[in-house]
């Protein structure tokens, strides 16, 4: 659904923001906001932001019959389709605009999800079917691997067709392609075993990254949070070039170790400042010191794109945000 016909929305904390006129939002008597799929206020809401909150959390809408016997792999593919002529024209326009900046073009074509954790609940669908609950998905990586293999096979087949169509239109004007945001790590450990990654996920990553590396000059960007150190060599092996967000505050993610061990095989995109603790709670000088330290570690011998560990959280002090930019300028000598 295109973003157009922009209109103002007052958030629960009083800020005026612009949203697409196609976005359907309702409010209850407590001041909680709800987003509705497909711009339809009559459809059950797919996202909820409490009046005291700052972000929309997706709502899990488990299908009435969610048993494995009732599922069809197509249920988890409903929101994905072939890129249309209009889609491709829009992408061409956006890439042209990005190239005019003289900077690298980083593209998210939205075509390689692999049950991306951010969209499992299918917020764009009115009545999603299939596995639409995060806990159910994680269990399924052990108990319903045949189903997920079929989903991934069909997803990756569609992805290859879309990648070929996109490349015909965009060529090598893209520098970096965002692959997907499936998170493999918690704060303390992996979501799945290495054996499960090898058998369930790796073949489909290789299938897609292999096509990209064979047919394009694009570098491949993969997002995953958490304690993923045991998985990092495997991510490089399946064709990932760039890893984000480098959550070094998670277990086993020592910055020096990560850079020394994996810095030759992976570009690190992130890790510049901890957004859970330092940025919202520390003093500006502490932010400065942490940014300088992380830049010193991660930029050694190249292969580093500065960014924070993750999204900036609400109520992070403005002085701390300024300290990030000033520290990066100081490190770069500009």
Image: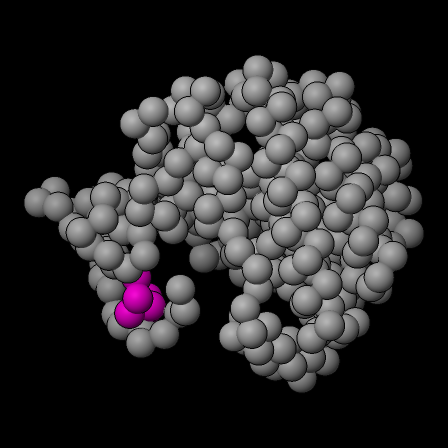
Task: Locate residue 212 relative to residue 225 in the image: left or right.
Answer: right
What percent of the width, then of the height, locates residue 314?
40, 48
Task: Locate residue 231 relative to residue 32 in the image: left or right.
Answer: right
- Of residues 143 and 220, which is closer to you in this image? 143
Q: Which residues are magenta?
A: 17-23
Q: How many marks on residues?
A: 0
Looking at the image, is 188 positioned above or below residue 113? above
What percent of the width, then of the height, locates residue 35?
28, 51
Instruction: Work out whether residue 240 can be spotted.
Output: no
Q: Which of the 4 quarters of the picture holds residue 212? A: bottom right
What percent of the width, then of the height, locates residue 8?
25, 70
Q: Is residue 170 magenta?
A: no
Q: Residue at x 47, y 43 (%)?
A: 119
Q: Residue at x 34, y 24 (%)?
A: 65
Task: Locate residue 120 relative to residue 56 in the image: left or right.
Answer: right
Task: Locate residue 80 relative to residue 30 in the image: left or right.
Answer: right
Looking at the image, is 10 positioned above or below residue 285? below
Q: Residue most toward the left?
A: 29
Which corner quadrant holds the N terminus? Answer: bottom left
Looking at the image, is 331 positioned above or below residue 277? below
Instruction: Work out whether residue 173 can be spotted.
Output: yes
Colour scheme of the picture:
one colour
Q: Residue at x 41, y 20 (%)?
A: 67
Q: Residue most toward the bottom?
A: 100
Q: Is residue 21 magenta?
A: yes
What percent of the width, then of the height, locates residue 254?
75, 30
Q: Residue at x 60, y 29 (%)?
A: 148
Q: Residue most toward the top?
A: 143
Which corner quadrant holds the C terminus? Answer: bottom right
- Of residues 153 and 212, which is closer to you in this image? 153
- Of residues 265 and 166, which is closer to you in this image? 166
């Amino acid at each position: 659904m295109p973003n157009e016909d922009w209109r103002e929305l007052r958030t629960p904390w009083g800020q005026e923001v612009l949203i697409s006129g196609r976005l359907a939002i309702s409010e209850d008597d407590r001041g909680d906001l709800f987003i509705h799929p497909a711009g339809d206020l009559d459809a059950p809401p797919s996202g909820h932001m409490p009046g005291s909150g700052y972000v929309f959390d997706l709502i899990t809408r488990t299908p009435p019959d969610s048993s494995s016997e009732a599922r069809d792999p197509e249920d988890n593919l409903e929101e994905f389709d072939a890129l249309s002529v209009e889609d491709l024209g829009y992408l061409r326009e956006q890439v042209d605009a990005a190239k005019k900046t003289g900077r690298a073009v980083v593209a998210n074509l939205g075509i390689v999800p692999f049950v991306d954790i951010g969209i499992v609940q299918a917020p764009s669908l009115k009545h999603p079917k299939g596995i639409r609950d995060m806990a159910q998905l994680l269990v399924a990586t052990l108990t319903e691997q045949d189903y997920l293999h079929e989903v991934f096979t069909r997803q990756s087949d569609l992805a290859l067709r879309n990648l070929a169509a996109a490349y015909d239109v965009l060529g090598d004007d893209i520098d970096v392609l965002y692959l997907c945001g499936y998170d493999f790590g918690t704060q303390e450990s992996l979501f799945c075993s290495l054996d499960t990654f090898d058998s369930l996920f790796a073949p489909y990553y290789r299938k897609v990254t292999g096509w990209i590396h064979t047919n394009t000059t694009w570098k491949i960007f993969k997002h995953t949070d958490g304690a993923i150190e045991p998985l990092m060599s495997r991510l490089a092996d399946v064709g990932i070039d760039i890893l984000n967000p480098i959550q070094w505050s998670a277990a086993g993610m020592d910055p020096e170790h990560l850079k020394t061990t994996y810095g030759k095989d992976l570009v690190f995109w992130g890790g510049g400042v901890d957004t859970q603790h330092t940025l919202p709670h520390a003093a500006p000088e502490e932010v400065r010191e942490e940014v300088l330290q992380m830049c010193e570690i991660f930029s050694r011998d190249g292969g580093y794109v500065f960014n924070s560990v993750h999204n900036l959280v609400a109520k992070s002090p403005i002085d701390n945000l300024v300290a990030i930019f000033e520290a990066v300028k100081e490190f770069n000598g500009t």
